[in-house]
Amino acid sequence: MKRLKNNLKSIGGVFTLLLLQLNTFGQDVAADATKPETIQIPEVLFDPITYLWILLGSIVLLTIYTMSHTIKALSKVIEGRVANVPEESEEAVGMQAAIKTSLYKRIMHSLVKTVPIEKEKDVMLDHNYDGIQELDNQLPPWWKYGFYLTIVFAFVYLINFHVSGSGKLQIAEYNEEMKNAELATKKRMENSTNNINAASVTILTEAGSLASGKEIYVKNCVACHGDLGQGNVGPNLTDEFWIHGGGIKNIFNTIVVGVPSKGMISWKSQLTPKATQEVASYILTLQGTNPAGAKEAQGEKWVEVVDSTTIAADTTKVDSVSSVASSK
Amino acid sequence: MNTEKFSYDNKIVRNFAVATVVWGVVGMLVGLIVALQLTSAKFNFGPIGNFGRLRPLHTNAVIFAFVGNGIFMGVYYSLQRLLKARMFSDALSKIHFWGWQLIIVAAALTLPLGITTSKEYAELEWPIDIMIALVWVIFGVNMFGTIIKRRERHLYVAIWFYIATVVTVAVLHIVNSLALPVSLFKSYSIFAGVQDALVQWWYGHNAVAFFLTTPYLGLMYYFVPKAADRPVYSYKLSIIHFWALIFLYIWAGPHHLLYSSLPDWAQSLGVVFSIMLIAPSWGGMINGLLTLRGAWDKVRESTVLKFMVVAVTAYGMSTFEGPMLSLKSVNAISHFTDWIIAHVHVGGLGWNGMLTFGILYWLIPRMYNVNIFSKKLANFHFWIATLGIIFYAVPLYWAGFTQSLMWKDFTSEGVLKYPNFLETVVQIVPMYRLRAFGGSLYLIGALVMVYNLWKTAAAGKFVANEETSAPALEKLTVEPKGHWHRWIERRPVQMLLLSLVMILIGGMIEIIPMLTIKSNIPTISSVKPYTPLELQGRDIYVREGCYTCHSQMIRPFRSETERYGEYSKAGEFVYDHPFQWGSKRTGPDLAREGSKYPNSWHYNHMLDPTTMSPGSIMPAYDFLINDDLDTSLTAAKINVMRKLGVPYDNDFDKIANRELMKQANLITADLATAGIKVAPNKEIIAMIAYLQRLGIDIKGEKVSSTNN
């Protein structure tokens, strides 16, 4: 049993050591990988999640390794007892184990260099502080070399980012992220039916689209326009008066560009063109519902002209009215 | 040999022990309250009982009242015995004790009243800061006096840590608290924006290093070998890890500001020094744990050792996690989330809390000459505290990870999957409930300890002055041989000076260029000083502790610029005395809040956040609508700001209040168009003015991003 305990302890030591080095190593790889610009490097290499998974995965693997060894060792002990093996072979097993532990011991000793407790007297210093004594054990080599490794890491890191310039600093990293997103958007727009804009948008009438439009409305619009479109901070959406023009095309446009001066944000980055079309269509179903507490009419009466493709050009006209706090 | 008779002062130790326990319970209780407030806004009792005001009270109470008194308790006990001398002056000990308690009371009164500088863990206003500096110097003098009249030639490793603590905390506290007073209860930091942020986190990180770590390592070096009755594992390791630790720690502050507007070179220094810190930190853990070699059978028996083992293990875990969190790729996920809260609590509850408990269970029976009242209860405390830590940390790791991934998630159509910030908060509220449960377990454990220690003390007889004797120290005629490090162990003053030099190097190399070299903070011409009304509003923002939940720092990530707008630039903060970047996002970032919503939205939102954001856990700030804005200090504030380099015109202070009313009237008029009737002299108007100003100076402009 004692041997088993020792084994477990050694495994624990190796485990933490590996964990330590694995992590710093992973970072080095990430830093080095950015060097050759010409070679295409898979994106996963830059994704921090990848490294987290590697870390977690290796923890799991090491745990399994440790557990399997423990079980093996345990089962040996149990078998040895239960099966009542003849003395001879038990000795053989013991010897085998002894060889094994001695290998472990040798590796562990070279990593730890601890003086065994029995020989402690040899390294006892003559210090005595209120009865506290101190041993003169060596710096554990695994610790010492780990320390060196972090110092090397520091130099490699600084050289990579600030001397050779091969590492991307945060703004370069950001610009690349944005460029990639832009490319992806472009690609998507080319081969997508989602390519709707204010000029081409049409009103949707099927129940499914309106239901999802309502969902979007409840999630994003009620705070300012009221749960029934009656208006609150924002204008009433149920009457026929519109500040920035009524009709599907104008409403779509207002949602996309927003009215920043009056506090309505642009929803371009939060709602896809299709979602915008759905919520705009839903808003139009509120026309004439006359909910309780409806806000007074604002803007001009909108008369839908069939086949109109013009967008009311007044989205930029109305500012300066309420941008009080933002001036000066 | 002439043996001298003297006695150890146990009374001062006992007093600090009582203070540790009392403030510990108070600090944890406030912690539980703020934890509950994060589960639902209904636990806020504004204004003095709002999260924004209580969170600083919690952090200050547990750091400076609980751990602070814990440090003094352990130092006063161990120092006397390690030096074979009574404390230098009983009077200084008493002044130190009562001075420190007075500071704590002052903190407990001023923080809920909103008297704060808003610099984390340094929120106390300037008169209290001065008191802290004085009491700290008294502690230092008392300690050095004792060292001078010692009867032990060499200083033990614990005392090296105490010395480094005393000198470094003094430097940190004084530099970070530099401020110009406006009135008795209001001051402005002399640093602004990026510089203020760097100084603050140089301080903040090293408050962890030199208040929560080095003194506690000193205590570990005394109490662990004592309780285990084993020799310290390695003297060589003590030497190397001590000097490496104090030298490296001081550089690591910028890891709190990764991906911020702090220049890249400073961020990188923060990263690499944090990584190098693993080894010195683990040196302490190894020396602590391996001291228990051959005593593990005792750990099974002794509750004291159990507490200490968990403490040292928690220390090892959090000092490994810390450097990992300092890697930019990990930090991009963890920063601003509850992951960090989990991390600090593994350190706080695990390392500081458990070591303190272990020491108390060891110390009190000894000083009262009696056995512990109930070993069973002590064991119960150990298990419930350990369980409490797990219930605290695990849900928060989960919450932090979940929320961060939600913030960063894009749909296949290239828009934010969770554009509404609130969605990401609602998602983790169940985790907040579990955390509050874990916290209450920990608190219950502490209360059980109070009872147990009380009963122990009642059963025993207190030994106020422990009689002892030791030979006097004789003058050295020849330098004794031995390890080279013994030389400095005989020379406390040199030890002090060398520690000072060690900790000044890193701080100076990072801070001085930031203050003197212009290119570190590229100026933006469109950034203008705040108007008087906005400045008043900003002071309300500071008073209410909005920074405890809202950051003002948009990091250069697509997920943040899509959500909040253009990433923050260093030049935007040049008039921010103090900076308001925040460190945690329980609510969304506000760096570009200006003109995002109409004035009426803010009015309604402050009146009752749930009307504008259903499900919000933000407390109501309805009192801002009723309270009049105090404009008596407007001119003084303008003058102090001008002294700090904010370019207000020479006579601007004279017309400041007139300007203020002009702007207030405009906002009131605008609110009236939305059907809201409110007088222009209310605090809410100033608050709206400030919020509407945030980040708009460079809105719509393309600012060159080459410099930073």
Image: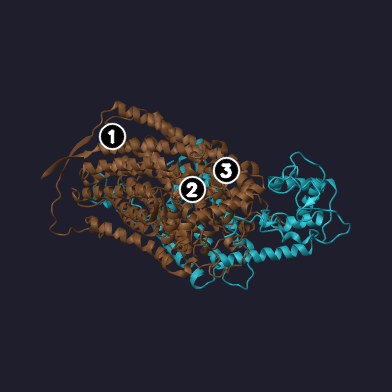
Chain colours: A cyan, B brown
* Crowd rating for badge 3 (residues with CA inside 10 Å; few <14, some 14–19, many 20+): many
Residue mark closest to the camera, 1 vs 2 = 2
Give the alpha-carbon distance from disc 1 to disc 2, as whole Å. Answer: 34 Å
Where is mark 1, residue-wise?
B366
Residue mark closest to the camera, 3 vs 1 = 3
- Of B67 and A232, nearer the camera is A232
Horizontal side, residue A114 vs residue B528: left or right:
left
Chain letter of disc 2 in the image:
B
- Name which of mark 3 and mark 1 comes first in the sequence: 1
Where is residue B685 shown, x and y percent of the image? 56, 49
The vertical placement of A100 against B463, above or below, is below
Chain letter of disc 3 in the image:
B
Where is mark 2, residue-wise?
B343
Horizontal side, residue B394 vs residue B506: left or right:
right
Give the alpha-carbon distance from disc 2 to disc 3, as whole Å. Answer: 24 Å
- Name which of mark 2 and mark 3 comes first in the sequence: 2
Say what secondary structure mark 1 lies in: helix
Q: Amino acid at mark 1?
A: Arg
Horizontal side, residue B170 vs residue B580: left or right:
left
- Residue B304 appears in the figure: no
Say what secondary structure mark 3 lies in: loop
Where is residue B250 shown, x and y percent of the image? 39, 58
Where is residue A178 shown, x and y percent of the image? 64, 64
Q: Amino acid at mark 3?
A: Met
Say what secondary structure mark 2 lies in: helix
Position of the C terminus of chain A, as image quadrant, is bottom right
- Of B534 and B77, nearer the camera is B534
Horizontal side, residue B316 vs residue B684: left or right:
left
Give the alpha-carbon distance from disc 3 to disc 1, as whole Å. Answer: 48 Å
